[in-house]
Image (cartoon, rainbow, N blue to C red):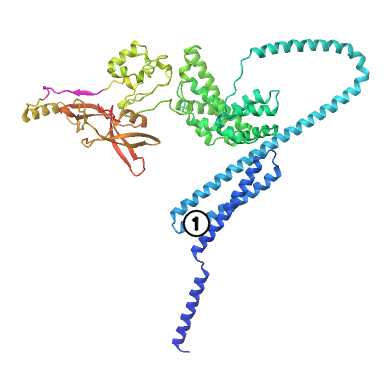
Amino acid sequence: MSNWDLEIEAAASEGDKMDETVIAQPDESLQLEDLKKEKAKAKSAFTKTRHSLLQILEEDFPDREEIKVIQKKLINAEEKAMDIMGNLYDKYKHRNDIKNVMKTTKEMEKIEEEFTDAENECRDYLIESKVASSVGSSLSRISKRDNVNSENKVESKHVTEEKEVKPEFEQTTKEENNNKQLKSELGSDMWKQLKRVSIPIFKGDKRNYQSWKAAFLACIDQAPATKEYKLLQLRQYVEGEALQVIEKLGHSAVAYDAAKERLERKYGGQRRQITLYIEELENFKPLREGIAKDIEHFADLLDIAVVNLKEAGRFEELKNGSLYNKLQRKMTESMLSRYHRWIFESGKTESVECLREWILQEAEFQTIASETIHGLSANTRSNSQRNYKGNRRDGFRTFFGESQNESYTGNRVCKCCNGNHGVWKCDEFRKLTVNKRWDTAKRLQLCYRCLGHDHVGRQCPRSRACNLGGCKEVHNRLLHRDKQSFSEPKVPVRTESKTKQNYAAEKKENTDAATEGENRDRTMIGRDRKSNFVTLRTVPVILKNGNRTVSVNALLDDASTKTYINADVAAELGLQGQVQKVTVNVLNDNVETFETMPVEVRLQSHNGQTDAKIVAFTTNRVTGSLQPVD
């Protein structure tokens, strides 16, 4: 065989191998199509199983064994669907198909959420039905045992004691009847004098379900009436989503029991109640030093949460874990210091229960101290005005100057003009100079911290630092004395007949008044000259500092060489900087020298396309005398 023949055979064998390789590797697009078909089948099977489980749970008397069987089927269907979608996700990711990767991720999250909801409803029903059956069986056993014991006792002693007991029994019976008659008369009289209990309307808010349920069970469910009548009453005390849950059940006695079970399954349960307590603890605003009401309310919330966690058997959450760390962050540094010293001296182990024990003691001691200093008749209402859900009082803030509706909403009769608003919103009060505002506040005996009139000084619930221009005084921002020092022109105001030489001389004289080393910048602020057609563009932006964000309107001034930010916005974001003096040339050749604080803040657009760090200087009012126009 020649070399040429050998080369042909080798080439042929290599070609056969390549054909085998091509045949052995399936087409990737065919794999994707197969996975898509499998995904559709798996999702369909999961949805059908889930719907069948929810249908059984909606029945009046569902079978526990049947529920368990379908629950296992649902678990298997969910696992199969997630495996197929996971393989599909890997294929898309390998092909760098970002669109389908995101779509598959959303589908997986949706299936997981639907599975979790169905599993929770199934578990809640199984637990509730098990507890109800165990209570019913124990009651039946106790009643049977009591009946047997009573029958045996009657049979054994009936003959021997009948003659001896009869006279005494008759006398005792008469006394008991007289006492019962007297008590019933007193009870009926007292019952008539009691104030009628009003049952609230339940609209589907899970936070209000337990209180509504207690009132309904006491007033309607335990009343001597038929279940059909109770169902009609139940429909009167539910609205919205809650009414939709029970309105199609009918009007029979069985429908009444089913309606209660549905409401309990959808809105009740120990798990939901504990979750609400923990959320309320997490939303609780940090404690304020020396405020007894804060620590009292925190102690109440912590006490309720610990008791419910114990009843549910969730002892792991009461140890030194994430909940324990979150609760410690609600306390002040001095409180944490005292707490850890107490832990060290008493030799206890850190846990939520130890924190609860110390908080209860601290609340009691703080209350004693407050009552000793301020007395029992102190204005405790002002301390309780704080919103513990973390929300501001009704109203809004504006960042074009001072804040609106800054104090709590109390009696809104203005002491300055007798209008239906607070002093902090009074136009007449705002028109006054700062010194006259102080005089008015003294004359009307207003609180300097919030301008309220029903308390003063340390009892103010809105005590905080001013923070305007770095001011650390505790007073309302309308009472802030601006530390600006204006350098007024030393020559008469320039008229139209002045020459350019005189104008240059005046400008030099004005600018020489500023000290050496101070910044000189020009910004176009209409302070002295008023124009009927001055308009500047604005754009909504987001200012961010750490976890704090504020949405404001940015004023675009093409003639300005620096960026300025309102001092109250800087205070709201917690921005800090070193105070320095700045000299600014404004309109009409005036020179202003004022204290400012350079701060760094992130500026973002609402669409997320712009995100930059800027340096801005604080000022009392960026817009000057300009007014917004609709």
User: Is residue 490 depicted above or below 271 in this figure?
Assistant: above
Residue 318 seen: no
Where does the C terminus fall, quadrant-wise? top left
Query: For the image shown, how many numbered marks are present on the structure?
Result: 1
Q: Quadrant of residue 510?
A: top left
Residue type highlighted by circle 1: Asp
Q: Which element is circle 1 on?
A: helix
User: Is residue 478 depicted above or below 42 in this figure?
Assistant: above
Q: Main secondary structure of the magenta part?
A: loop
Q: Which residue ends up furthest to the bottom in the rendered image? A: 1
Q: Position of residue 312 (x, y in %)?
A: 63, 34
Q: Position of residue 301 (x, y in %)?
A: 54, 27
The segment highlighted magenta reads 483-493
**Of 121 and 197, which appears nearest the observer?**
197
**Which residue is at 36% across, 32% downward?**
573
Q: Quadrant of residue 595?
A: top left
Q: Which residue ends up furthest to the right in the rendered image? A: 159
Q: Is residue 486 magenta?
A: yes
Residue marked by disc 1: 90
**Which residue is at 76% across, 30% downward?**
139
User: Is residue 62 depicted above or below 1 in this figure?
Assistant: above
Q: Position of residue 250 (x, y in %)?
A: 65, 34
Residue 164 seen: yes
**Of 432 and 42, which appears nearest the observer?**
42
